[in-house]
Image (cartoon, rainbow, N blue to C red):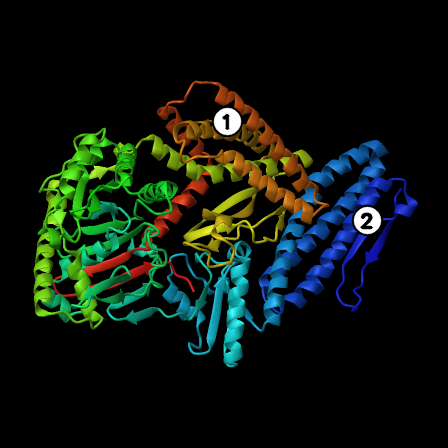
Amino acid sequence: MSNLRLMRWIYPQQTGSGFTFIPNSSTTNNTDIEQYFLQIATKLKKFDIIINHNLPHLLHGCLKEWIRRVQKLQLYVIYRYMNEIEGYLKILNTTSKSSSDLKLRKKIQTELNRIINDLTFDLEELQTKARFINDLEGQKFQYFNVGTCNLSKTDDINILARILIKDNRNDRILCSNDILNSNNQSKLKILLHKLTEERKANPNLHLIYADFSYTSFHLFKMMILPSKQSISRDNLSLTFVDPSSTSIKNNDVINILLIGETGVGKSTFINAFINYLTFPTLEQAQSNKPLVAIPVSFIITTGENFEEHTVKFGDSNDLNNEDFQHPGQSVTQHCKSYVIHLDYNDKRTLRIIDTPGFGDTRGINQDDLNMQHIFEYINDLTHLNAICILLKPNVSRLNIYFETCLTQLLDVLGPNVSQNIMFCFTNTRSTFYTPGNTAPLLKTKLSSLPIKNIPFNKENTFCFDSESFRYLVAVQNAIQFNVEEKQEYETGWLNSVNESNRFLTFIRKQLNTYSLRNNWQSIRYAQIQIKHMIRPILEAMRNILRNLILCSIDPLTNKFIKLCPRALDRPSAFCASCKRDPFQLKNFWILPDDAHDFQSKCSTCSCVPDQHTSIDYILSYDILNSSSNEQQNKMTNLLDQLSCASIDFTHFLMNNVSRSIKEDPFRMGLIRIIREEKQICEDHESNQLNLRLVQELEKLLITYEDQMKKKQSNEKQENLQFIYERIEAICKHSIIHEQMIAIHQQREKCKDNHHEIEITQNSISQKIYLSTEC
């Protein structure tokens, strides 16, 4: 019979208490069972020290409700522990030793271990937050839990500011949450340092960290309050708003895709077009300030001595889409929408999509990347109304990339889109507002294409004088012109106003809307879809292997790691050079997604662009409760499906899009995540779960390479319909579907970062809708 002894632990500071009974192992033969109880008692002692001493010291009075919750769970664990001991004693009195051992071990595994693991998980999470709060306290930041404010997910930034800001002059509030912090630790450090430096300059500042981890309010990005809610610059107003509140119904939008060779003047054309629609005469335009949707930078020559003047208008820092530093490269770096509200009876909205130019000096690979970007940008549009090809008059030859670009468009969008193609010519004052010598060259080129029915006639061709707009901007820069020059520009302005109105009338009355959903199914479109699926599939396979390893360790487990993707709200990338600190979840070490802000270069780190990989979303993780047997079978089946699909997709890409796909993207992705897991193992040598994960991933890679060799030796090619069916089937799985939704949301957010201009009979206003950020 086992004796019990009362155990009381005392802290060094003589504070806190925790009582429990443990079997006295010195007087019993059931050493295995009693050793287990002793280990649990030691854990309970550690829990008591953490809950009643360490955490209150680190939390500085914060998160009291959470402390009370873990204290209740602690008491419940002690209660269950003592019940187990009582049950153990009853078993010893009524059954044989071997029978009691077997029953007790099974009972402990399914009950006591589960609730101790729950408490351990909660304490690990709370200790991490407590250390963070303690660090904030050391930097003289006040911690504030926004969860106590009852904010809803539908509240906007203005409501948030009114609640948090008490002293608009001296309060400086850093808003973030645990997910944002773990995914972008470097940015958090930068912002904390920035505010600390501000306080050095102004000791009266009150620094607050507002924690959004426990509220339904969706914080897209770290930000600092108060921020300037509006910035007036000439007639341009920048307003921070929720992008979803400014979204435009697709049926009410006229979508125009604007494409052209690098240097043809697409950005200038958009600026000029807006002004031609706004001001019927040059005199009216000069009486106001030009509407500049895109920063302007050009050289103009005047006078008998050909004096050169560099003209700049607009702030390129506000619209970070133009690169004026590298001549010969496309000035426009990314697709961007310019939305124009016109005062017409039908109240429709015009969206002009500016694109990177083809014929980039960086070569044909850059042109391919630019075309890929264009296709991805319009991927989620329901329709196009027109494809406007911008050309210069009187060119001696058409660039070879013009044909390549046009061919790719027709390949991807389908031959029927040819009836929605229009041609616009810039700088036509010198050719008396005609296409000049470009016309016969264009006719010859169009007749040589596989699709012969692309119209090119007076009806779908428009001649503008962008020089009139340049003149308007130059006048704003105090550059002088003679009377004759002014008269020429006035004539050019009137002609361009007439062409702009004819342009709109033709689109609205003569062109049928081209449905992308009904027509867009091609090899290139399949390539776009597969490209977006590569990361979701790889991350899904890695996480399935994590959970299968958990099942192999504990067949009765009902807790699994779940991927929680979150869309990014601006162009971002991973940096291969910057170190990431892993965090622990279910005894796995996991590298957080550290997203760097990335346009043409990284604004988060100084590493070279080649070290960065573009991403659409970041992953956080949760614990999912589910039946282990059912879940294990599903995971095994899904892993097999994903492995087979990745082989089919790669085979399709490598054999149908040879120039764009030089290396096996799935194989390279597997190698990358194996490298990540090996780095974790080097930093945490004692972690066996990550070591097993590396082994399983390496097996997966070997199997993949073997299957790919067999696939490549088979001359049979999957047809396009099979690939589309495969894509649809894989995307239905929730672990893939949720990541694909995040990718879709990111692209929609990028589209919501549009430049919006309203033109009415009585007023003109401009707004740029941006995601809220510091």
**Alpha carbons under labels 1 and 2: distance apart:** 49 Å
- Residue 34 placement (x, y as % from top left): 83, 44
Q: Give the answer, above or below, for where 217 lies relative to 387.
A: below
For residue 759, side relative to residue 694 (left or right) = left
Q: Residue extending furthest top?
A: 715
> Which type of secondary structure does the marked residue at label 2 adopt?
helix
Q: Residue at image x 47%, y 37%? A: 534
Q: In terms of sequence position, does the residue under pointer 1 or pointer 2 come before the other?
A: 2
User: Which disc number belongs to residue 77?
Assistant: none
- Specify few, some or many for label 2: CA neighbours under 10 Å numbering under 14, 14-19, or 20 or more: some
Q: Amino acid at mark 1?
A: Cys
Q: Amino acid at mark 2?
A: Leu
> Which type of secondary structure does the marked residue at label 1 adopt?
helix
Using the rendered image of the protein, determine whether residue 758 is visible from the camera's viewpoint.
Answer: yes
- Residue 189 placement (x, y as % from top left): 55, 64
For residue 73, side relative to residue 409 (left or right) = right
User: Which disc number belongs to residue 38?
Assistant: 2
Q: Residue at image x 26%, y 41%? A: 399
- Residue 119 placement (x, y as % from top left): 66, 51
Q: Residue extending furthest right?
A: 27
User: Which disc number belongs to residue 644?
Assistant: 1
For residue 27, side relative to residue 202 (left or right) = right
Where's the N terminus, which quadrant?
Answer: top right
Asked which quadrant contains residue 304, the reply is: bottom left
Q: Residue at image x 19%, y 46%? A: 395
Q: Residue extending furthest front?
A: 305
Q: Please tell me which residue lies in front, 417 or 356.
A: 356
- Residue 227 placement (x, y as % from top left): 40, 69
Asked which quadrant contains residue 476, the reply is: bottom left
Q: Please tell me which residue lies in front, 727 or 479.
A: 479
- Specify few, some or many for label 1: CA neighbours under 10 Å numbering under 14, 14-19, or 20 or more: some
